[in-house]
């Protein structure tokens, strides 16, 4: 099991928190894990223990800075990836993205030579044909989104999470409690800004360069995801420029490793294969 170190340093005039552990395969490029909404790098702890790598709290989330003037857009998060990797002195990575971690695909498509292997897990579709789910549509409405965010409670999160979890009942209490503890005003503002700057047509436009990614790829999908239909797993694989394996999990939801803990080992084996 990898020894995980925690760091908080100033990047671009804001504090950034990340966890880091040495790669499980000596000499391998580190794995860069990018989380989504509304969580943080905490999502990746079991993966870091197995593979090592880097898992930041994206700006606006977790323990990273939440400045009112932060660039909480797809492009802003892609630029953050560049900034973080330059700061830690990393050139090539094995990249894992979940949910809004998909913004990291913009960085990857612009610098495909820097990505050795890629894993896409229930990621926001940078593809044509996607329509925002109900909660996202409410967040995108000014006034309504603020009211909905302000009314967030532990009870409400538990009820909403029932749909995201394939197992009966809500997501684990520890998961719900962690999300609620980190969902302060700064994170709420970052979420609203990210969704409001990302209409569906902008998602499709952002993904037009995916064909430039030709590295070995695994697309893993919890098919009982209430936010993103499983057909987008196959659509991602088709949009990439290289061969991509698609792994559908009919018994898993939006955070599939919570329903299927064995997924940690499955992804680790793929990431640890010799880069093609």
Image (cartoon, rainbow, N blue to C red):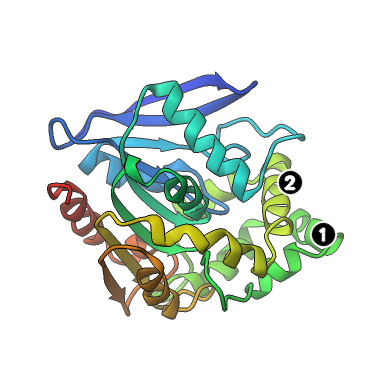
Q: Quadrant location of the N terminus?
A: top left
Say which residue appears at 76% left-offset and 58% top-offset.
151
Which residue appears at 50% of the width and 44% of the height? 40
Badge 2, how many Cα within 10 Å: few under 14, some, many 20+? many
Q: Residues within 10 Å of mark 1 (few under 14, many from 20)?
A: few
Q: Position of residue 15 (x, y in %)?
A: 58, 24
Which is nearer the N-term, disc 2 or disc 1? 1
Relative to 18, say whether 267 is above or below.
Answer: below
> Which of the 4 image quarters holds residue 63?
top right
Q: CA distance from mark 2 to mark 1?
A: 12 Å
In percent of width and height, residue 199 lies at: 69, 65
Specify whether residue 239 is in view: yes
Residue 167 in sight here:
no
Q: Would you name the residue on which mark 1 appears?
A: 147
Please report the residue visible at 51 percent of the width from the left and 19 percent of the height from the top.
9
Q: Is residue 155 left or right of residue 150?
A: left
> Where 260 falls versus 77 (above or below)?
below
Location of residue 270 in the rendering, given as x and y in whole percent from the top left corner: 19, 55
- Which circle, 2 or 1, is nearer the viewer? 2
Mark identifier at residue 70? none
The numbered disc on residue 189 is: 2
Direction from residue 7 to residue 1 in the image, left or right? left
Q: Secondary structure at mark 1?
A: helix
């Amino acid at each position: 099991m990898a020894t995980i170190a925690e760091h908080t340093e100033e990047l671009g005039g804001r504090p950034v928190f990340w966890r880091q552990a040495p790669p499980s395969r000596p000499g391998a490029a580190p794995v860069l894990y990018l989380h989504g909404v509304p969580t943080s790098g905490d999502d990746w702890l079991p993966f870091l223990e197995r593979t090592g790598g880097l898992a930041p709290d994206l700006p606006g989330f977790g323990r990273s800075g939440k400045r009112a003037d932060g660039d909480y857009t797809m492009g802003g998060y892609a630029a953050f990836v560049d900034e973080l990797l330059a700061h830690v002195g990393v050139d090539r990575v094995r990249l894992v993205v979940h949910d809004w971690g998909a913004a990291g695909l913009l960085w990857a498509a612009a610098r495909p030579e820097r990505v050795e292997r890629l894993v896409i897990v229930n990621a926001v579709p940078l593809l044509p044909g996607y329509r925002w789910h109900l909660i996202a549509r409410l967040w995108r409405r000014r006034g309504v989104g603020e009211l909905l965010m302000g009314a967030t409670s532990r009870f409400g999160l538990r009820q909403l999470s029932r749909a995201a979890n394939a197992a009966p009942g809500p997501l684990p209490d520890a998961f719900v409690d962690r999300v609620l503890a980190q969902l302060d005003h700064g994170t709420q503002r970052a979420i609203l800004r990210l969704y409001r700057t990302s209409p569906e047509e902008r998602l499709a436009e952002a993904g037009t360069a995916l064909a430039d990614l030709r590295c070995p790829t695994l697309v893993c999908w919890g098919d009982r995801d209430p936010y993103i239909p499983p057909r987008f797993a196959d659509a991602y694989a088709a949009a990439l420029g290289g061969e991509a394996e698609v792994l559908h999990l009919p018994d898993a939801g939006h955070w599939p490793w919570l329903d299927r803990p064995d997924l940690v080992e499955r992804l680790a084996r793929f990431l640890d294969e010799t880069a093609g």
